[in-house]
Image (tube, rainbow, N blue to C red):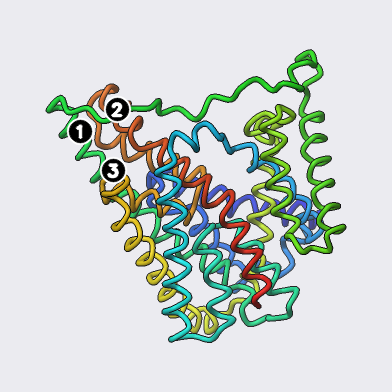
Amino acid sequence: MQTVIALSVIMLFLFVGEWVSTLSKAYIPSVFVTAVLFLIGYWTIVPKNVTTTATFTPAFTTMIQAALLVHMGTLMDFKTLLHQWRAVVIALCGVAGTALLAMGGGLILFNWKTVIASVPPLTGGIVAAFLMSNGLKAAHITALISFPVSMFVVHSIIGYPLTAFLLKKEGKRLLTNYHRGEFEEVVEPEQPEESKPKFVDRLPKIYQTSAFQIFTVMALAGLALGLGTLLKNTINPYIICLVFGVIGHQVGLLPSHVLEKAGVFNWLMYGLLSYIFSFLATVTPQNLVNILIPIVTMILLGILGMFIVSFLLAKPLGFSREMAFASALTALFGFPADYIVTHESAKNLAKTSEEESYILANTLPKMLVGGFATVSVASVIIASIFLKLL
């Protein structure tokens, strides 16, 4: 009975966050609302071990993270990345600008471990927050365990509205040119069309079941973790999981969005979020006040780094400054938030379906590719590097 009640409480916090985000058209991030509910719960009547009681244990979460990283590899489409290479360059350079300015400015103001715990969540959202929190826990740096999670929650409050503002400015510019007949280069707004899996398609569709898809993902995840052990973790096993996912997708062993098609993606993501929010159990009201100043300072330094780099690269790469900055900001949240915010901005600006399609055709591919390059790839690499610096 305790397990059922614990799971009910967690899902209550998660769905309230989603509802508030939907009602606010993604201007109030769901992760922020859920995090606040967890904090209030921990400070009042919710037990500190609510997530483990609900069976979201560290062992389960390790499996989740490996599976999700293989899944993230299937989101990568090389043809789209090549076509949108300029967005990739801006997004990755924005990440570099964030890391350099946050490290340089942060070390002047704060100690080494605080800065190291801060930078990865700034460059990769939830994935980096999970990796850094686990690393801090393993290193017994208890004072900073909640830091990456808090960073992830707070920067979403700043990142979502700022990105929406930039996309609206870009949308207005596009519409002005559209009505003047000055059309820009247009690509299709839909997500990249996947080629038919070479191997999977040889099976009759009745055998392409959820169990088969989950088996394939877990088999690749197991091989990746095993290879990481053989290499004595000189390469972070989670990077290998991501690489195996990319390879599996490119050779046709895995379809894109494989765990979504298997019907388990949301459940696994809820499990990961719940485990991440469990680190907030160590946060007291006094502790939150103490870490808020370094968190906000590091976020502002990181976003300033993104702005400077995107400002310098926008004109040479043929982007408006607003579009370049928005592409760089995808490092803060990635998919599906970038997809939602871009659609909402286009929908609120356009008066006709043609206008909406035109805006999306010139913004959505850049945002999706930017998020894929940063959150799916760069964040895992950066977090693995910074874990060695603790």
Task: Specify the amino acid type for callout 3.
Answer: Gly
Q: Do labels 1 and 3 touch, CB within 8 Å? A: no
Question: Which residue lies under the disc numbered 2?
Answer: 358
Q: As rendered, which of 87 and 284 lies closer to the eye?
A: 87
Q: Secondary structure at mark 3?
A: loop
Q: Crowding at label 1, few (<14), some or many (≥20) Cα neighbours within 10 Å? A: many
- x 59%, y 81%: residue: 113
Q: As rendered, which of 284 and 371 lies closer to the eye?
A: 371
Q: Position of residue 79 (x, y in %)?
A: 52, 31
Res 170 seen here: yes
- x 47%, y 46%: residue: 337
Q: Do labels 2 and 1 touch, CB within 8 Å? A: yes
Question: Which residue lies under the disc numbered 3?
Answer: 318
Q: Position of residue 296 (x, y in %)?
A: 42, 73
* Disc 1 to disc 3, C-alpha distance: 18 Å
* Disc 2 to disc 3, C-alpha distance: 18 Å
- x 66%, y 78%: residue: 390
Judged by depth in the image, the label closer to the viewer, 2 or 3, is: 3
Question: Which residue lies under the disc numbered 1?
Answer: 175
Judged by depth in the image, the label closer to the viewer, 1 or 3, is: 3
Answer with left or right where residue 277 lies relative to residue 115: right
Q: Give the mark, 2 or 1, whose residue is nearer the N terminus.
A: 1
Q: Secondary structure at mark 1?
A: helix
Q: Crowding at label 3, few (<14), some or many (≥20) Cα neighbours within 10 Å? A: few
Name of the residue lying farthest toward the left = 180
